[in-house]
Amino acid sequence: MMWVTDFADGNKDQKDLLGGKGANLAEMTNLGLPVPPGFTISTEACRAYLRQGGDPEGLEDQVTERLAALEAAMGRRLGDPTDPLLVSVRSGAKFSMPGMMETVLNVGLNDRSVEGLADLTGDRRFAYDSYRRLLQMFGSTVLGVHSDHFSDALDALKKARRTEDDLALAAEDLEELVETFQGIIREQAEVEFPQEPRRQLDLAVHAVFNSWNTDRAVLYRRQERIPEDLGTAVNVQAMVFGNGGMTSGSGVAFTRDPASGDQGVYGDYLQNAQGEDVVAGIRNTVSLADFAEIDQKSHNELIAHMEKLEKHYRDMCDIEFTVEHGKLWMLQTRVGKRTPEAAFRIAAHMADEGLIDWDEAVQRVTGDQLASLMFPRFDATAERTLLATGMNASPGAAVGRAVFDWRTAVEWADRGEDVILVRKETSPEDLHGMMVAKGILTSRGGKTSHAAVVARGMGRTCVCGAEALDVDTKTGQFTVRDSKTIREGDLISIDGSTGEIFDGAVPVSPSAVVRHFEGEDVEGELVDAVARIMAHADTLRRMQVRTNADTGEDAERARRFGAQGIGLCRTEHMFLGDRRQLVEDLIVAESAEEQQEALAALLPRQKGDFEKILESMDGLPVTIRLIDPPLHEFLPDITELSVALAIADTRGHRKRHERKLLAAVQRLHEQNPMLGLRGVRLGIVIPGLFEMQARAILEAAAARTRAGGSARPEIMVPLVGSVRELDLIRHRIEQVAREVSDELGVEIDYKVGTMIELPRAALTADEIAPSAQFFSFGTNDLTQMTWGFSRDDVEASFFSTYIEHGVFGISPFESLDVEGVGQLVRTAAEKGRAANPALHLGVCGEHGGDPHSIHFFDEVGLDYVSCSPYRVPVARLEAARASLAND
Ligand code: PEP
Ligand code: MG
């Protein structure tokens, strides 16, 4: 097995094997950019290590061999006492997991080589600063010492020297710190810091392997749907130093602004700094323009490399670099994370620039990003009190109660509060809190800080680096420039697009993108980018997109949003309000005549409902589902009614109607109503009910035709498990249709089909298909019935525990369980089509608006998805992306 690959031998397409960082380091090396040499230990080695709990056969030898080559290239030996080669050991999985996994820098330093380094560079301060960093990172990452021990000791030293600036510490201070850190390791980990360089290297590599399975990495992968079994690669690279004085430094840069998508480079630079300093917010960074003032030559080289990288990757790149005594080194590049707004604008710009084509532009954005652009923004006309302004790190308008630690965030969010997580700066430990918060606010760090990067990745609103805030996480409060104090629980509002922080809850207004979809004439680059990408997406998709709508108003909005018909009009709510009485009458009717009367009273009302909906979708198909839920949902509560009657009894009142009603309620009472008398079963048991609905639909369609419209109703029978059920109802509907046609003298264009929402229906789809003109997958019930858990109860009761234990990564009611429920969908689609080639197939469960599920529906060949009006644009985009991906 080849476990180790030299940077010079890899390329950017080997992310599976070399991880993202390793593959891109290799690519940069081969592009001729100044990359310090090194090698990558593969993800395969990591998987083998985790599987067998130790190094796989041959790994040690291969590392020895590559290390020897690296030493030869650099003309130094690892940890040599007089002229040491030092290396960095960095994790790098296939998908970037910012801040989730481990890095150890300056490996190779020990009590002797630190002196060698000091002599060689003539800079004791630098040598000991490097050593204390190694002890700190090695101690926490490899030996499991809590990082607070080190940062507390550093803080204490700074305090003793009466400074807040780590640069103000002298060489002797750092020497002292090295001793303190070694003591911490001895005390906390009960081992000596290993002096042997190769042993340091091996332990660091193992720590990186093991970091694949830390809680926070596991949590992040679930959230981002990154597979569990990929493992991480490890990059071992010759160190270059940004901490050797003011002619050195380190920085991060983006080839375009990752927050807004603006053209032009964007970045932060920090003089005399190493590694994470620049993103950890310990000191405030300077912009690239200021970097040009500091070091024109390195700046110009950096800009040239960035141009080269963007052209080569044909995408916005995110870069880490270091300047060592005026020499620029490129340490990392990858396709950069960006906000939803930036994603759309960058894709459209790049298509305009000819860097990518429009198909690719569609692939560069996601339905989730579009959905987040459809959230409301703060109402600019509302009165508001500005507390301070920080950096606009991740857009959105978030309102919530201030909390100052991740545990409180989780606790409060669990009980339904909206929270804003406020920190000085965030670290990977805060991840859980960031996930549940509506927004994140920090007082330190730039747009490339941990808080900003992670928030953007999660689509969470974030304002960072608000220096006016004095955040005290211990007492749970922040003070704005010695004036107003906000305490834990106080309401604040943060605007991630402008960086503004407001006191109290600011009202929000609709997004520009939604106003555009609504047909308003909205200007701006974002709306323009969205419009052009959507227009192209509509030319690409194979599946149609319909909407779930029960009212004319919803249907009209969905149509403006691009819906191509209604995939599900639920008729249940049409039986509530003042019509409830009629339903009661229907249920308690003691004779066919009474029943007929109740139905006759419902008919014109239903007809009116359907006319409105058919009118709003004129010319497009409208699937109307016959009534589905158990009838007792329309009846009074059994206990209340019994009590009222008992009281009436003691007073000697007669209450004839109520007594009949109670008898009916008792008769209809069920232990498991979801598995009881509902759907097609109702239609079969209560004569006349479905016929009345069918008549209302068909008469409404006839009326529309007469009025010059074009009605295309599709009558859908719910909860069918056997073809016999469908046939019984279908024959009745056909009978009604003949009657209506004859009575009104109008030919009606209608279809009859069924929902597939019971496993039995899916399994016998070949028997059902010849009796149906269409199938619509009711994936809500199909999920409920397949897993055997109640959709109304379980999400709130035990899903969080299930997700914690990894039974599933996301609720199967939110995103289709492709392996289980998906098999039923696939089977039914295949069997149905084989038995009836003209069969039209769609889906109308919640999954119809979920990006991941949409890709699956495209793959199994459904004709359309149907979702709520606001998800229609998301579904249009994802259906197009699915067409491209599944081609
Ligand atoms: C379904 O079951 O997926 C469905 C669309 O019907 P309802 O949600 O109304 O049960
Ligand atoms: Mg259903």
Image (tube, rainbow, N blue to C red):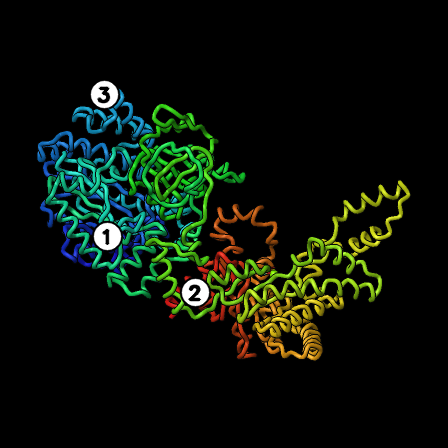
* Residue bearing the label numbered 2: 879
What's the residue type where badge 2 is placed? Ala
| Of the two numbered discs 1 and 2 in the rendering, the one whose residue sits closer to the viewer | 2
Callout 2: helix, strand or loop?
helix
Q: How far apart are marks 3 and 1 (CA)?
A: 41 Å
- Left or right position of 371 against 353: right
- Examine the rendered structure and indicate whether residue 349 appears above or below residue 423: below
* Residue bearing the label numbered 3: 161
Question: How busy is the neighbourhood of tag 2: few (under 14 within 10 Å), some, or many (20 plus)?
Answer: many
**Dot 2 or dot 3, earlier in sequence:** 3
Q: Kindly tell me whether residue 432 is visible in this rendering.
A: no
**Dot 1 or dot 2, earlier in sequence:** 1
**Dot 3 or dot 1, earlier in sequence:** 1
| Of the two numbered discs 2 and 3 in the rendering, the one whose residue sits closer to the viewer | 2
What's the residue type where badge 1 is placed? Thr
Callout 1: helix, strand or loop?
strand
Residue at 67% across, 66% down: 607
* Residue bearing the label numbered 1: 40
- Left or right position of 403 against 232: right
Q: How far apart are marks 2 and 3 (CA)?
A: 62 Å
- Left or right position of 595 against 52: right
Of residues 668 and 468, the one drawn nearer to the viewer in this rendering: 468
Residue 61 placement (x, y as % from top left): 22, 52
- Examine the rendered structure and indicate whether residue 641 appears above or below residue 592: above
Question: Is mark 1 in CB contact (under 8 Å) with mark 2?
Answer: no
Residue 645 placement (x, y as % from top left): 83, 45
